[in-house]
RNA sequence: GGGCGUGUAGCUCAGCGGAAGAGCACUCGGUUUACACCCGAGCGGUCGCAGGUUCGAUCCCUGUCGCGCCCA
């Protein structure tokens, strides 16, 4: 262990671990020593994680804290394993979210962005970013993130903007980016187009009104939840096979309130079973109607502007859509055209994911990415295993997306973002400009006003941050990245886009080898935690009160691929208790001379307990390793927790006390030192702060951050030692149980003899058992007043106690009766099984032998217990 | 409507063909020379329901009911 100073010195550990006071200082020391800075010239194998860039508007919430705990644990372990680790940080400019935030600020001063003008407004956003944008980065430091701050990026910085322009140009030239007029999701408040994934659907209460178009035999009834759109109807559609309407197909009907005559068309997409089987067709304001309109050559009549205000001439001109709706219904009612009304009528309504405004479908000219070929490539990379998704169950959802992706609307009518690099000339010229191309100037030339969807630039993140389009050393060394860790909720928002862009830009090399998808954090009511709902627990609050380590451990302990986790205060407190336990155990071991300065004694010089704990430790290393490799953080944490608390603290430390007192101090101190050394290394990726403090105190080493990761020995387990310690546990537990049920105070010393330990191979363990169960040596006046027997695999051990008086016979009968019932149940079960001929004929021999052994044990237990019961005095 | 997942102790979850587990909560007892953020003992479940496969099912299959998520 080369990282250890030979002249080990031991700073005294304070009595209590006070994370809030010391974590920041520890973190700064790591940063100052530049442990987290990746060396591109290193010949170590690379391990790369790009941080999912948080929104510049964001602050750290539990979802981040969980994801960061995962990424930090993964990268710290790899660093200890000898990888050249790069964890690259940065932020996303978050187009709509940031623009909205700044607009809200302006609104407080009574200003709009239009008042400032585009240039000034964008300046304002940059100022806002400088002032508030760094918040989340400082919060990451508190969590302990081992991030390479020297490589911090921003999606709007110069290099990334260059990457955006480069790929836009490349895709434009390849015919993968085009302009088209289509129905898009439009937010009337944000005044911009939205992609499908920026629209959230919810079941809202609305109204369903049925309106009669036309009169008499030629009339037809249509139902709608958006009555105001009837002003833009250009047809009524029915199913071609619908018997009810055969006579009307091809005729015209008068559209109420407008006097316009519109055709009745037959279209197979109309569901004859829904409502009256006839639908109004508003091509300019509904995506399905737009399709119908295309098929039948209907005009697209726009009747609302970008603010969802009616523009159709007439009495409703200038009304907002939600004012127009009741007004139009009232006007129709006055004409006797409302034949049915259902209110409330619950139906699915789309909302802007940024401001929750009801989305209005709108016909407009936008820029699109043709996804077919790049989505197919993204699909192929997962199908052929270049990128592995964890858990694999989410592959199907991934394929559902990549195989059915619609062309992606990438233009946004915002000011904050990457402006589309397309210029229009005075004579209808359209020129797409690359980063090194000359921008056309002169009379009549103007740039496209729109900016790109935020996900366009964040989709380039895995390679743009490494210097692409330049062929940089970083790109060569650290691409493809090793793991992308994120919540499954943004698999499609972001992961699919990165896959498409990465494969396209990097010659089919995947952006990441592994995609780890964790679940969502839920509150104690099982509700998703989110900024918008305001039901989040603040991870900073936990860090303040319980420490960053406890916060991290809580989150890691609940993290399994793809499954959600509910968190509550008690969990964080439990993790804090765990760190306290570790602190006290290490402090105690150090006070008793635990050391790594001497080599571990040879195997045959160790006690069974020493050999057992070392074997357990070895098994722990394997378990932590395999679980980390499989992203099973929860299992890894459980293994670490139970080894630390249950095996090491509850048993080995108690045994160690006896061994040290009995003249085996040197060897025991070495074992203690060794176990703690390895254990702290294993825990470091999960709880870096406390382990760093304890480990440097124990070993005098420089830092765990750059210490070596332990390797499992692969040696066979010492089964004899294991059996001995299991016997010790059983013996101690049974004596404690007897004491407890006899009403003895835990600390009360009782004289006692342990008989027959040698016959079952437990002689060496007796001193430990006596110490753990407060048995004192029998004196001259020793009188056996109680005897208990503990059944062990090799036979029973008899414990004779002098309780200085009569025992509680009733309690003892109860205890024995309970044991008897357990043994009887066991006997019944095994007897039945062994009496089943089919079982005897078909069950494998080892299973049969096991059942036979269990039956024999049950029988001897029953005999033994019955004898004890018979020997008890009458109650 | 289509797809996926899930129902195990009061709560949150692990286990997934051969003896029902953890943490928290709860009960009892504790100034035990590391730790009351602790120690010891205990209580608590016909593993959603109904069929089937099997010598054997919490575990596999089918159906059913409840819940959740994604897509329409």
Image (cartoon, rainbow, N blue to C red):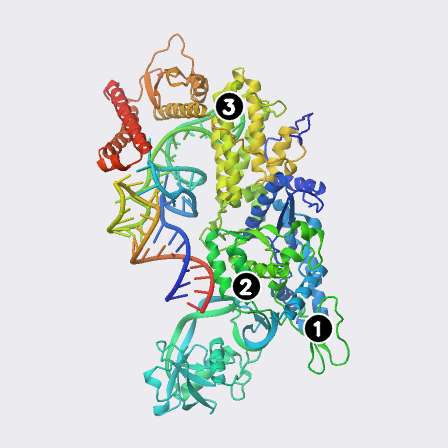
A821 lies above or below A124: above
Viewer-proximal residue among A866 and A319 = A866
Q: Quadrant of the C terminus of chain A?
A: top left
Give the label, 3 or 2, closer to the camera. Answer: 2
Q: Are marks 1 and 2 on the same chain?
A: yes
| Label of residue A275 in the image | none
Q: Which chain is indicated by disc 1?
A: A
Q: Where in the figure is residue B52, as x and y percent of width and height? A: 25, 50
A791 lies above or below A255: above
Give the label, 3 or 1, closer to the camera. Answer: 3
Viewer-proximal residue among A49 and A503 = A503
Q: Quadrant of the N terminus of chain A?
A: top right
Name the N-terminal-most of marks 3 and 1: 1
Q: In this orientation, does residue A547 appear? A: no
Q: Image quarter for residue A757? A: top left
Disc 3 target residue: A610
Give the label, 1 or 2, closer to the camera. Answer: 2
Q: Residues within 10 Å of mark 1 (few under 14, many from 20)?
A: few
Mark 1 secondary-structure assignment: loop
Marks 3 and 1 close (CB-CB < 8 Å):
no
How far is mark 1 from mark 2, CA to CA? 38 Å
Mark 3 secondary-structure assignment: helix
Mark 2 secondary-structure assignment: helix
Q: Which chain is indicated by disc 2?
A: A
Count of marks, rendered view: 3
Disc 2 target residue: A375
Q: Report the side of A33 relative to A768 (left or right).
A: right
Disc 1 target residue: A117
């Amino acid at each position: 262990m080369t990282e250890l100073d030979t002249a080990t010195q031991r700073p005294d550990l304070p009595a209590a671990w006070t994370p809030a006071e010391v974590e920041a200082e520890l973190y700064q020391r790591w940063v100052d020593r530049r442990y987290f800075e990746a060396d591109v010239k290193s010949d170590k194998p690379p391990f790369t994680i790009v941080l999912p860039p948080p929104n510049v508007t964001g602050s750290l919430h539990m979802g981040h804290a969980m994801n960061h705990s995962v990424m930090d644990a993964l990268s710290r372990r790899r660093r200890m394993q000898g990888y050249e680790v790069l964890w690259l940080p940065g932020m996303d400019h978050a187009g709509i979210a940031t623009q909205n935030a700044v607009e809200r600020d302006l609104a407080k001063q009574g200003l709009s962005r239009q008042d400032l003008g585009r240039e000034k407004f964008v300046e304002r956003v940059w100022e806002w970013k400088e002032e508030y944008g760094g918040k989340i980065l400082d919060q990451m430091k508190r969590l302990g993130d081992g991030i390479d701050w020297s490589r911090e990026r921003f999606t709007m910085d110069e290099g990334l903007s260059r990457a955006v322009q480069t790929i836009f140009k490349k895709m434009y030239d390849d015919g993968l980016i085009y302009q088209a007029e289509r129905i898009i999701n439009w937010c009337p408040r944000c005044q911009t187009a939205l992609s499908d994934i920026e629209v959230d659907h919810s079941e809202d209460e609305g109204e369903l009104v049925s309106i009669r178009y036309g009169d008499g035999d030629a009339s037809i009834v249509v139902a709608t939840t958006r009555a105001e759109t009837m002003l833009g109807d250009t047809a009524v559609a029915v199913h071609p096979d619908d018997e009810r309407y055969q006579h009307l197909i091809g005729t015209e009907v008068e559209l109420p309130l407008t006097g316009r005559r519109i055709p009745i068309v037959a279209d197979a997409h109309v569901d004859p079973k829904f409502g009256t089987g006839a639908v109004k067709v508003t091509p300019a304001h509904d995506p399905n109607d737009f399709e119908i309109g295309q098929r039948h050559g209907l005009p697209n009549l726009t009747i609302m502007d970008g603010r969802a205000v009616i523009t159709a001439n007439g009495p409703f001109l200038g009304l907002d859509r939600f004012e127009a709706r009741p007004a139009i219904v009232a006007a129709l009612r006055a004409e006797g055209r409302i034949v049915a009304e259902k209110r409330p009528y619950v139906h699915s309504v789309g909302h802007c994911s940024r401001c929750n405004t009801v989305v209005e479908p709108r016909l407009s000219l936008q820029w699109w990415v043709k996804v077919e070929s790049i989505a197919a490539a993204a699909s192929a990379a997962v199908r052929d295993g270049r990128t592995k998704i964890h858990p694999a169950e989410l592959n199907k959802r991934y394929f559902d997306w990549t195989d059915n992706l619609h062309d992606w609307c990438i233009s946004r009518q915002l000011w904050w973002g990457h402006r589309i690099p397309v210029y229009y000339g005075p004579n209808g010229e359209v020129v797409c400009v690359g980063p090194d191309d000359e921008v056309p100037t002169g009379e009549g030339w103007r740039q496209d006003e729109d900016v790109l969807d935020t996900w366009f630039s964040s989709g380039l993140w895995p390679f743009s941050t490494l210097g692409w389009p330049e062929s940089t050393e970083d790109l060569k060394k650290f691409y493809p990245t090793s793991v992308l860790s994120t919540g499954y909720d943004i698999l499609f928002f972001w992961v699919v886009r990165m896959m498409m862009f990465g494969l396209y830009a990097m010659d089919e090399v995947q952006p990441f080898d592994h995609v780890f998808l964790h679940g969502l954090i839920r509150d104690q009511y099982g509700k998703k935690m989110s900024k918008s709902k305001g039901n989040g627990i603040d991870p900073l609050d936990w860090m303040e009160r319980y420490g960053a380590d406890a916060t991290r451990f809580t989150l890691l302990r609940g993290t399994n691929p793809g499954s959600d986790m509910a968190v509550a205060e008690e969990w964080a407190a439990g993790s804090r208790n765990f760190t306290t336990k570790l602190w006290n155990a290490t402090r105690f071991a150090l006070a008793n001379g635990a050391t790594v300065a001497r080599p571990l004694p040879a195997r045959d010089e160790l006690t069974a307990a020493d050999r057992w704990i070392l074997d357990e430790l070895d098994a722990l290393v394997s378990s932590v390793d395999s679980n980390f490799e499989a992203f099973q953080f929860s299992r890894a944490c459980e293994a670490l927790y139970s080894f630390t608390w249950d095996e090491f603290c509850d048993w080995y430390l108690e045994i160690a006390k006896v061994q040290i007192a009995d003249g085996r101090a040197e060897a025991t101190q070495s074992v203690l030192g060794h176990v703690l050394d390895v254990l702290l290394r294993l825990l470091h990726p999960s709880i870096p702060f406390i382990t760093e403090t304890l480990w440097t105190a124990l070993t005098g080493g420089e830092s765990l951050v750059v210490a070596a990761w332990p390797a499992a020995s692969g040696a066979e387990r010492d089964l004899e030692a294991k059996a001995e310690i299991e016997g010790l546990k059983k013996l101690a537990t049974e004596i404690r149980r007897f004491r407890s049920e006899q009403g003895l105070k835990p600390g009360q010393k009782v004289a006692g003899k342990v008989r027959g330990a040698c016959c079952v191979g437990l002689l060496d363990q007796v001193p430990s058992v006596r110490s753990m169960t407060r048995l004192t040596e029998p004196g001259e006046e020793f009188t056996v007043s109680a005897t208990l027997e503990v059944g062990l695999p090799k036979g029973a051990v008899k414990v004779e106690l002098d309780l200085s008086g009569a025992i509680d016979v009733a309690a003892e009968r109860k205890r024995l009766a309970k044991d008897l019932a357990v043994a009887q149940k066991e006997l019944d079960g095994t007897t039945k099984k062994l009496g089943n001929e089919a079982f005897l004929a078909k069950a494998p021999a080892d299973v049969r032998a096991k059942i036979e052994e269990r039956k024999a044990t049950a029988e001897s237990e029953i005999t033994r217990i019955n004898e004890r019961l018979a020997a008890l005095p009458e109650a």
